[in-house]
Amino acid sequence: MTEPLVLIPGLNCDARLYAPQWPALAPGRSVMVAHNDRDESLGALVGRLLAAAPERFALCGLSMGGYAAFEVMRQAPQRVTRLALLDTTAKPPTPETNAPREQMIALAEKGAFDNVTTLLWQKLVAPSRLADEELRLLVRAMAETVGPEGFIRQQRAIMGRPDSRPGLSAIAVPTLVLVGEEDAITPPAEATEIAQGIGAQARLVILPGCGHLATLEQPEAVTAELLAWLG
C-alpha cells in the first residue's frame, strides 16, 4: 500500500471535484476526502481533518482546499509527505476581497442561494466552458449538497484565513503548484508567488485554456500531474 492521500475540496464543492482523478489515484492507496463545510474557521476544519486522517499522508487542496492545506502545514507539517496546491493563493483576505463574500452570504441568508451559484459560475471556469451545461450542472449539484448553511460556514472560514506567505519557505516536502492559465479567481501570478516562496521543492504547472476548476476542466492533465507528483 502506497502513502495515503487526503483531498480537500474547494468552496461549494464536495468529493465530486476530484471524481475524474479518482480511478487513477485510488488503486492501492487509501484516499480520504475532507469535510470542508462543517466549520467556521480553518483551524477547526483542519483539527477535524487531522483527527480523521492517517498519521502520514500526501495532501492536495484546490482553492479553499489550498487555504486549508496551508493550515495543515502550520498545525502538523510533520504529518505531510508531499503537498499539491491547485488554483489557490497564499495571500490573506482583504476588505476588498471580503466584500463580495459578505454579499453572497447575505444572499444565502435571504434564501437566494441559487443566485449565489449562478454568480459564482461566471468566474469558476474558463470563458470557453461557460456554455458547458454538463459541467455547470455538476457544479450546481455540488453546491446544492453543500447548501446555504455550509456555504456560509465556508465563507466565514475563508474570510478569517491568515496570510500563508510567511510560512512558504518552511515547506520542505515535494510540492505541486498548479493553476489554470485563465483562472480569474486565483490567477497564475498567485501560483507563481507560492512556487517562488517555497523554492526548490516546488514545481509550477500552468494549464492553458483552463479556469479555476482545473480538476474538472482539464481532468486528464491534472491527473497526469498528480500521478507524477505522487511518484
Image (cartoon, rainbow, N blue to C red):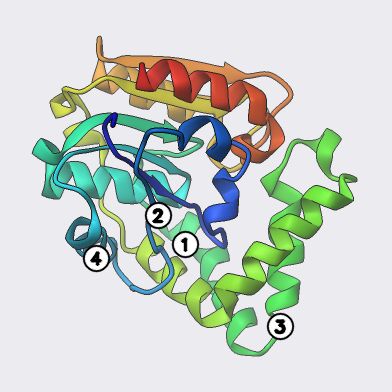
Asked if labels 1 and 3 touch by Cβ distance under 8 angstroms, the answer is no
Q: Earlier in the sequence, mark 3 or mark 4?
A: 4
Q: Position of residue 70 (x, y in %)?
A: 27, 43
Which residue type carries mark 2? Thr
The Cα–Cα distance between marks 2 and 1, rounded to whole angstroms, is 6 Å
Residue ID for mark 2? 94
- Residue closer to the observer: 103 or 67: 67
Query: Is there any visible trace of residue 163 in the rendered image?
Result: no
Which residue type carries mark 4? Arg
Asked if labels 1 and 2 touch by Cβ distance under 8 angstroms, the answer is yes
The Cα–Cα distance between marks 3 and 1, rounded to whole angstroms, is 19 Å
> Mark 3, mark 2: which one is toward the viewer?
3
Residue 98 is marked as 1
The Cα–Cα distance between marks 2 and 4, rounded to whole angstroms, is 26 Å
Residue ID for mark 4? 48
Please name the residue shown 28% across and 61% down the image: 42
Asked if labels 2 and 3 touch by Cβ distance under 8 angstroms, the answer is no
- Residue closer to the observer: 9 or 200: 9
Q: Secondary structure at mark 4?
A: helix
Residue ID for mark 3? 112
For residue 13, what is the image quadrant? bottom right
Which residue type carries mark 1? Asn
Please name the residue shown 35% across and 27% down the image: 194
Query: Is there any visible trace of residue 202 in the rendered image?
Result: yes
Residue 203 relative to residue 145: left or right: left
